[in-house]
């Protein structure tokens, strides 16, 4: 529960503007994900004739994932003023309350862990980190056409299958988005005249 109120000191107008834009973009991301309420589920089975693994999942259509990716990209791309780690870092440094700082550190660490996970591809014997999957899809299919990235994604799709690759992309975005929404809750009222963040009333330790 977000119950603790901590003061933010010395934050600039530009930083407040970026946080305001961050909130707007999180709301659009949440809206784009709202139609997909089902928990992502996948399964594998062995084809009796070919001996190959068959991958099945309740993945949204690629165009629907692209629509979500367009919104998610604002928190992923390094050059964006609303990039997740950028907003978290610039806000955290303005806070002296250890409880609030530790909670924000926890969100940052969980986001990093999510980016390093590889559940889908690992289950198919070829572990690829979520950060890599996102980078390849974004830079070869969705937003850019880098030839090297296209070749690399094509190879991955040949190894684990395009459906598994797309499912991992979708679940990676879903998982990372949950921590973006956690940060949104922290800064949801942070503006000129109300320079506070809101965190759980709990003292998170480094090991929590």
Image (cartoon, grey):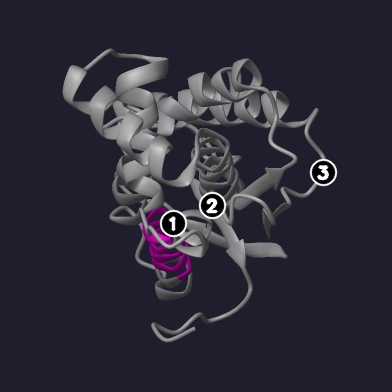
Q: Cα distance, mark 3 to mark 1?
A: 22 Å
Task: Identify which residue is drawn at 40% across, 37% down.
Answer: 158
| Residue 111: image tag | 1
Residue highlighted by disc 2 = 179
At which x and y percent is residue 181?
59, 45
Q: Is residue 79 visible?
A: no
Q: Secondary structure at mark 3?
A: loop
Q: Write down the residue under mark 3.
A: 38
Q: Nearer the viewer, mark 3 or mark 2?
A: 3
Position of 101 with respect to 178 (left or right) is: left
> 63 or 200, which lies in front?
63
Could you say which is closer to the camera, residue 47 or residue 9?
47
> Total marks drawn?
3
Q: CA distance from mark 3 to mark 2?
A: 19 Å
Pointers 1 and 2 in contact (C-beta within 8 Å): yes
- Name the spot of residue 164 as percent of width and height, x first: 55, 43
- Examine the residues drawn in magenta and state their main secondary structure: helix
Residue 92 placement (x, y as % from top left): 35, 55
- In depth, the one of 71 and 59 nearer the eye is 59
> Element at badge 2?
helix
Q: Counting residues from the N terminus, which is met first, the one under dot 3 or under dot 2? A: 3
Cα–Cα span, label 1 and label 2: 6 Å
Residue 117: quadrant of the picture: bottom left
- What span is in magenta? 103-117
Give the residue at x 44% y 58%.
118
Mark 2 crowd level (few <14, some 14–19, many ≥20, 10 Å Cα): many
């Amino acid at each position: 529960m977000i119950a603790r109120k901590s003061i933010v000191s010395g934050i600039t107008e530009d930083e407040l503007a970026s946080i305001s834009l961050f909130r707007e973009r999180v709301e659009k991301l949440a809206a784009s994900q709202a139609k997909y309420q089902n928990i992502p589920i996948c399964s594998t089975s062995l084809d009796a004739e070919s001996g190959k693994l068959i991958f099945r999942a309740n993945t949204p259509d690629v165009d629907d994932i692209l629509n979500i990716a367009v919104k998610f990209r604002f928190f992923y791309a390094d050059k964006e003023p609303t990039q997740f780690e950028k907003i978290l870092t610039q806000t955290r440094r303005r806070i002296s309350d250890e409880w609030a700082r530790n909670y924000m550190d926890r969100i940052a660490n969980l986001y990093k862990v999510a980016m390093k996970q590889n559940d889908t591809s690992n289950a198919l014997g070829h572990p690829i980190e979520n950060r890599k999957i996102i980078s390849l899809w974004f830079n070869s299919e969705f937003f850019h056409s880098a030839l090297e990235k296209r070749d690399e994604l094509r190879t991955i799709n040949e190894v684990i299958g395009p459906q598994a690759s797309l499912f991992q992309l979708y679940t990676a975005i879903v998982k990372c988005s949950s921590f973006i929404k956690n940060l949104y809750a922290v800064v949801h009222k942070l503006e000129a005249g109300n320079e506070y963040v809101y965190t759980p009333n709990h003292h998170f330790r480094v090991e929590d």
